[in-house]
Image (cartoon, rainbow, N blue to C red):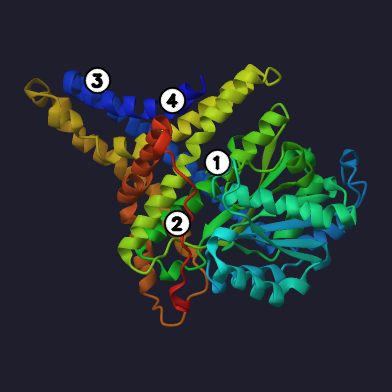
Amino acid sequence: MIKFFEVLPAMLSWLTLILMFLVSWKAAFWAAIFIILFDTYWLLKTLYLSLHLRHAFNKMRENEKINWLNELRSLTNDKQPTTHDIGNWQDVYHLVILPMYNEPYEVVRDSFESLTKINYPKEKMIVVLATEERAGEKFQEIAKKIESEFGNRFYKFLATTHPMDLPDEIPGKGSNESYSAEETKKKIIDPLKIPYENILVSVFDVDTQIGREYFALLTYKFLTCEKPQRTSFQPIPLFINNIYEAPALARVVSFSATFWHMMQQARPERMTTFSSHSMPFKALVEIGYWQKNVVSEDSRIFWQLFLHYDGDWRVEPMFYPVSMDANVAHNFWQTAVNIYKQQRRWGYGAENVPYMLNGFRKNKNISFKTKFYWAFNVIEGFHSWATNAIFIFALGWLPVLIGGAAFDRTVLAYNLPQITRWILSLSMIGVASSAILGVILLPKKPEGLKIWQYILYFFQWILMPFTLIIFGAIPGLEAQTRLALGGKFKLGFWVTPKERRASN
């Protein structure tokens, strides 16, 4: 059964694309009707998601302006739910894990520098730099340099070294994070007898720069949400740290990812965890930490928690950003290759489909309604990832091309290109909205950047159809196919190279 679940995402995606060709060839009229209806659906969905994007953006801007430490100080016991049994905000500790592989010193230092500027007591911060033995001595030296510079600026600091070639592991973030969390528990948390339920653990990619109010807001949400010990907390990833160094292609892909996760904040009922996020340490210990043999550990941890607690787990949107690096390499072509590989790794999150479905099959305590809701939305999401852009931008004229002479003489054949072009032109309203927000989200203008160059940052979005296919649908389809084929085709964890041209 598990093998069927692994094949399912690719089977659905490939079957859909093959049927599109067959129907366009043998029943061109119905294919044309389907294309018009699908393009209309995509237009309405684009407008709908644009509204969510605007709402999430405004909410994020509001949260950035609030002094959340003051909000914590004013949070009285009678306002705080009595079922939490945590105490006041000063009883909450934050464990911050930053897994590191082969990132340069400048990248790691910028992230630690941002941690020192947070508006939150440093004596409540336990910071772990989780290095890899397989990276070599050079990066152990970087870790020592970071420790000497920042080690005394938090309550506790720990540098761990994840051994290589451990059994039942694949090299990657999940195995490194699990090792570092266990080491921190053994060396710091247990000796100090800090209650697990009073600890929030945050995992950040080592290029992640934390906003000033992040931990105060996180603590506030932890203390005021309905079920703090059954909730993960998800910020909005902004891939903008080095955005002025990125080519237009990388900027469009980076902002597209940012906007998707921003829109998801407005739909918390469908959210799973992604990349940098936070969760209760007590729950993490109870499930045995991150699985050590998966690529998509950031979303897998959600399903581990969801299944362990019989569906009683949710993700709380923070409507607050953390900034990360855009994909930048030493030249354009290497940047394009890295973008593709990163998108393929994200697309390999389809490995959660068989894990989820098999877990649903075994778990009798989760209602059928809940199982159906999540199964449909997750599978539909990966199916859309691999097929929608191809439908919209590549197959819209397929019935005209292969539908035969009889269809070519129909009015529908004549009007199909005009109808699809008109619908897609209307959908550019959503693209224009993204372009405007993309300019607004740009960090402080570096010296030498001319005002007129911002026009290019707006018009770069004409690349979006290209990026949706080449750096969206195709790597997503490849990832699903590799999962289905298994064996030597399965993906390992690919670490996105971090380069800062300014520091090279």
Q: Earlier in the sequence, mark 3 or mark 2?
A: 3
Give the Cα distance between marks 4 and 1. Answer: 18 Å
Q: Earlier in the sequence, mark 2 or mark 1?
A: 2
**Rendered location of residue 8, percent (x, y):** 43, 25
Element carrying mark 2: helix
Element carrying mark 1: loop
Image quarter where the C terminus lies is: bottom left
Instruction: Give me the residue at 45% from left, 82% from top.
Output: 447
Count of marks, rendered view: 4
Element carrying mark 4: helix
- Above/below status of 31 relative to 114: above
Q: Earlier in the sequence, mark 1 or mark 3?
A: 3
Q: Earlier in the sequence, mark 4 or mark 2?
A: 4
Say which amino acid is labelled 4.
Leu
Give the Cα distance between marks 4 and 3. Answer: 26 Å
Mark 1 — residue? 294
**Are circles 2 and 1 on residues that touch, CB within 8 Å?**
no
Mark 2 — residue? 254
Mark 3 — residue? 30
